[in-house]
Image (spheres, rainbow, N blue to C red):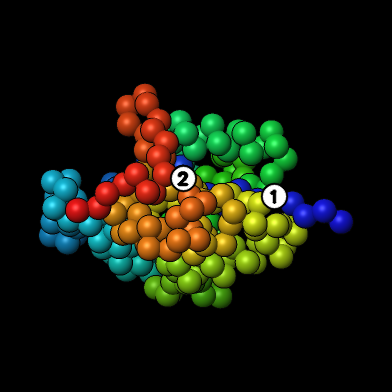
Amino acid sequence: MSKNIGAFFDIDGTLYREGLIAEIFKKLVKYEIIDPERWYNDVRLEYQKWDKRQGNYDNYLLRMADIYVEAIKGLHRSQVEFIARNVVNQKGDRVYTFTRDRIKWHKQQGHVLITISGSPIELVREMAQKHGFDDYKGAVYMLDKNELYTGEVVPMWDSKSKKVAIHHFADKYNIDLSKSYAYGDTAGDFTMFQLVGAPVLVNPTRELIKKVQESKETREKSLIVVERKDMVYKLTPDLIQID
């Protein structure tokens, strides 16, 4: 029996043009589940650092994720799912041209489409359905027996978690990883790149490029894609110089 070819996509910063956690965070503020002061006092500083290119975007997202955990504790699953549906209905088309076209191409080739994202599973599920993925994994925020959020989370934004996830899907769908593709933008996606035959760095962070450049095997098989305005630039890691 011949094996399938997989295409593994990160969402935040790879398919979606920003972070989905930021969108659901804004909704929680709007619905007064998160006090607006939490934005001004706890998140804004990290955002301003990133906006001025003086800080790390991941720090901004992780700060919001910490507050998100606190905010949804005690909420019912249906409340968060309702907000997640609204976010994706309103913002789900805000994606990069390159990755949208690659999803279409992979479907035409009959590849197994999978998204592995650090965003909350409720958002990942909605995005997976909207864009026609075959399967998905996201960060799981735990529920008690009454389907209320407990404040515990099983992450999916780190390299270790994504490595476990990609092996899970490879077994589930009989995927030949050596012939498969992966798309990501941060260091958390690096293990996916090590495992597949065709890694694609989409608007990558400095940390991810550095990791790829330091790994000869990964560097030689990787492609860097940068999308700005209506142009898509394709580069090899060897062409990038990090100061």
| Residue at image point 55% right, 36% down | 102
Instruction: Tell me which numbered mark, 1 or 2, is placed earlier along the sequence.
Output: 1
- Specify few, some or many for label 1: CA neighbours under 10 Å numbering under 14, 14-19, or 20 or more: many
Given residues 32 and 125, the one toward you in this image is 125
| Residue at image point 56% right, 49% down | 198
The picture places residue 48, in percent across and down from the top left corner, at 14, 50
Name the kind of residue labelled 2 in the image: Leu
The picture places residue 119, in percent across and down from the top left corner, at 43, 56
Given residues 150 and 23, the one toward you in this image is 23
Marks 1, 2: nearer the viewer: 2
Identity of the residue furthest to the top in this view: 230
Q: What mark, if any, has residue 72 been given in the picture?
A: none
Residue identified by numbered label 1: 5
Above or below 54: residue 159: below
The picture places residue 68, in percent across and down from the top left corner, at 33, 62
54 relative to 108 in the view: left or right: left
38 relative to 236 in the view: left or right: left
The answer to whether the residues at label 1 and label 2 have Cβ atoms under 8 Å apart is: no
Residue identified by numbered label 2: 223
**CA separation in Å, label 1 and label 2:** 18 Å
